Structures are given as C-alpha cells and as structure tokens.
Image (tube, coloured by chain):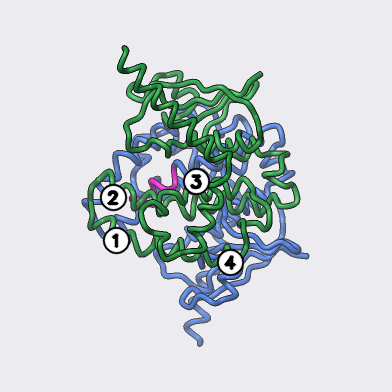
Chain colours: A blue, B green
Amino acid sequence: MTLVLTTYDWVPEFPRGFVRDIRVRWLLEELGRPYQVETVPVREKSPDHIANQPFAQVPFIRDGDLTLFESGAILLHLAEGTDLMPEDLRPQVQQWLIAALNSVEPFIMAWAINKFFDKDEAGAARREPLLHQRLAQLQAALGNRDWLTGDSFTVADLLMADILRIPAQNGFLDDLHGLAAYTERATARPGFRKALADQMAHWRAADERQATA
Amino acid sequence: MTLVLTTYDWVPEFPRGFVRDIRVRWLLEELGRPYQVETVPVREKSPDHIANQPFAQVPFIRDGDLTLFESGAILLHLAEGTDLMPEDLRPQVQQWLIAALNSVEPFIMAWAINKFFDKDEAGAARREPLLHQRLAQLQAALGNRDWLTGDSFTVADLLMADILRIPAQNGFLDDLHGLAAYTERATARPGFRKALADQMAHWRAADERQATA
C-alpha cells in the first residue's frame, strides 16, 4: 500500500517551501520510496484532521495501518532500518535529531514569531544574541566533519539542515561559514531539490484550483 | 560500569526541581537502574563541559563508552528495550515524546521566557492564548485514556508530564481537569518523587559546600 502524506490544501506565499511536509518528502526521496499526497483544508480544521493531528497541523502520514503525526517522529519511523539511521549510531542520530527540534528550532521560531508574526522588531532583536550563540555552538560541535554523526548523511542531518534554512535565509549564517556550508551541502542533495520542487508545484496547483473554482 | 549522570554543581532557588536532569533521574528510578552523579560548574562553562554538551547545558550521561546529551535522546536511549518503550508502540511513543519536545514545550518556554526572564508581562500575555490552546488540544487527544499511548505508562508520558509541571504550577491546567489529573497521576509515581527528592538534596548539598567553602 502506498504511503500517504497529508498536507494543507493551500497556504499563502509566505510559508511556501517551509511547510513541514517538506521534511517527509525529502526523506522519502532519499529512500526512493513512492508516496501520494492528500490534503486537509487549511482554513477550516475538520474533526478528521484533528483525529489525525491533534494540534490541527500538518504533516501526518498513513503507512499501512499506522497513522503518525509530528514530523520528527515521522522521520524517525521512516528512517528505521535504513542507511539514514544506522543501527550502531542510533543514540547519536536520535541525539542530533532531538537537538534540532528542542535546542535549535525553538530559538529560531521564537525569533521568527517576534519578527514575522508579531512584527515586534524589539522582541526579535532581543532573541538574536541567543539564537546566534546557539548557531555558533552548533557550528563548533560540527567542527570539520561533513555530517553531525560523522562521514554519512543521516536523518538527523536532514532535519537539522531543513531547520537551518530559515536562519540561513535571514543572514544568521553569514559569519558562520562552516554551518552555512553544511546547510548548503545538505540542501544541494537531489532529494531536497525534488522535495522542494514538488512542494512548490503542490501550491501552484492549489492556486490554479482556486482560480478555476 | 555504573551510569554517570552529569548536572550542574549549583543553581539558584528558581529552577530547582526543574533542572532537566530530573527527567533522567526519574527514568532511572522507573527502571531501577543505579547511577552516580557528577557535576560541571554552572558559572564557568569548561571546555570539557562543552565537549560533552555543545550548548553548555545539562544533563549529559556516560553509559559505558557512550556519552550522550539532549534529555529527550537520553530518555529514548535508556528506555530502549524496556517496558517504557514497548517495541510494538515505538512509532507512537516516539511521536508523543517528540510532540512534548517540539509541539508543547516550546510554547511553555516562550511564555516562561517572557514572564520570568524578560519580566515582559505584555509579551507573556500575548503567548497565553496559544499555550492554552495547545494544552486544550493535548487534553482532547488524551481523552479518557490514562496514558498517551494507551493503558501503559511509557517514556513519552514521563517526558510530557515533566514538561506539564510548569503550566500546572502556573494555573494553566486549572480548567483542564483531565490534563491536570494526568500530570498528577504521573508525578505521583514513586519514581518521580524519588527523583525530585534526590535533585533537591543535590542542591542542598551544594549550598552546604558553598557555605563551608
């Protein structure tokens, strides 16, 4: 049975390319695993949506009998038993995947919420030193390695690099060349390029459906 | 070889009982696994500390040859192969553990940072509706079950309940009786009581060392 990935039926320009289904698309491309896309309405959250994703967000997946939400957990589940989650590196891969979600992303989101949602420049400015410190610490931890756990790209790199796209695009990596190169190295992979193109095509198709509706 | 859990050598009154080593202590009590505690200076972050925890935080552990940071990842690693991470529920346990870290805790921390660190009451008030919504969604998802994945307490409940202590103590669960009862049910467990007592004793011993230094 083909894996089903559910995302929104439409989003405005602003988050396009960053809706979190991209992480799952990227991993599925890396794994060469076919999938189909279904949608839930972004404007009216249905009981069916909430039954599958209690916070009324996306993505969630259906993989055989299993329904799963929370992109980090979907990545862990899909990477299980593949080269992107080597069994002998499981603790370290989990460590960096969770570091991405709990020690890096919240600092980015706190800044981005102030900056883009609240339009609170003073608040955003207050978040910047801590965010910059986190990113510098991450670069120091990466050191001269290509990937967080060594020579091989894992699902932890996939998630970390996806998360780093927002600071990269907002100048936070301009003086962190190692981390900038890491983010570029990851997002240059064909799997990410395909995932990004497919997500953007999904939103274009949504615009066309709206235009003809 | 006894597992070594590293935490700070001292912290002020405010975070006592909430320093994240408590999650690891709690799990180790649930598993009946002995451990010893080592410390790193809270005031001056040493190169050795940063080599073990790149964000200069605590806890980290040494388990045989493995050194691991990020409390969520330490929990996943230690729960592996135990009743607190049933193999047939792995995807769901991972899902709720990551939901705690990425979909619940960041909203609590965003509020707490405004409230307690920035002393920004207006900022904190702006975060409250979203935090309250998250908690209400979580309660709805829990429904009438005792634990997030069913009848059995798992490592996901341990982490979620630990995270919910801050909103519980700040009135956010006063009208969310199901979630309040869930948090109480979890933190009434002997493993949590022991972990909390041990962490508090650790800070008292630190005060005494300071007093006689």
SS class, disc 1: helix
Q: Are callouts 1 and 3 both on one chain?
A: yes
Q: Are callouts 4 and 2 both on one chain?
A: yes
Which residue type does callout 3 highlight? Asp
For disc 3, the chain is: B
For disc 4, the chain is: B
SS class, disc 3: helix
- Estimate the x, y position of residue A40 in percent, counting from the top left: 56, 73
Pointer 2 with pointer 1, Cβ within 8 A:
yes
Q: Relative to B190, is B105 above or below?
A: below
Q: Relative to B192, is A202 above or below?
A: below
Circle number at residue B126:
1
First in sequence: mark 2 vs mark 1:
2
> How many angstroms separate mark 4 from mark 1 (CA)?
28 Å
Instruction: Tell me the crowding category of disc 4: few under 14, some 14 to 19, or many 20 or more residues within 10 angstroms, Cα based.
Output: few
The label nearer to you, 3 versus 2, is: 3
Q: Nearer the viewer, residue A40 or A186?
A: A40
- Estimate the x, y position of residue A164 in percent, counting from the top left: 45, 45
The N terminus of chain B - image quarter: top right
Residue of label 3: B162
Per the rendered image, the range of residues in magenta is A104-111
Is A110 contained in the magenta span? yes
The C terminus of chain B - image quarter: top left
- Which SS type dominates the magenta stretch? helix
First in sequence: mark 4 vs mark 1:
1
First in sequence: mark 3 vs mark 2:
2
Is residue B112 shown left or right of residue A59? left
Residue of label 2: B114
First in sequence: mark 1 vs mark 3:
1
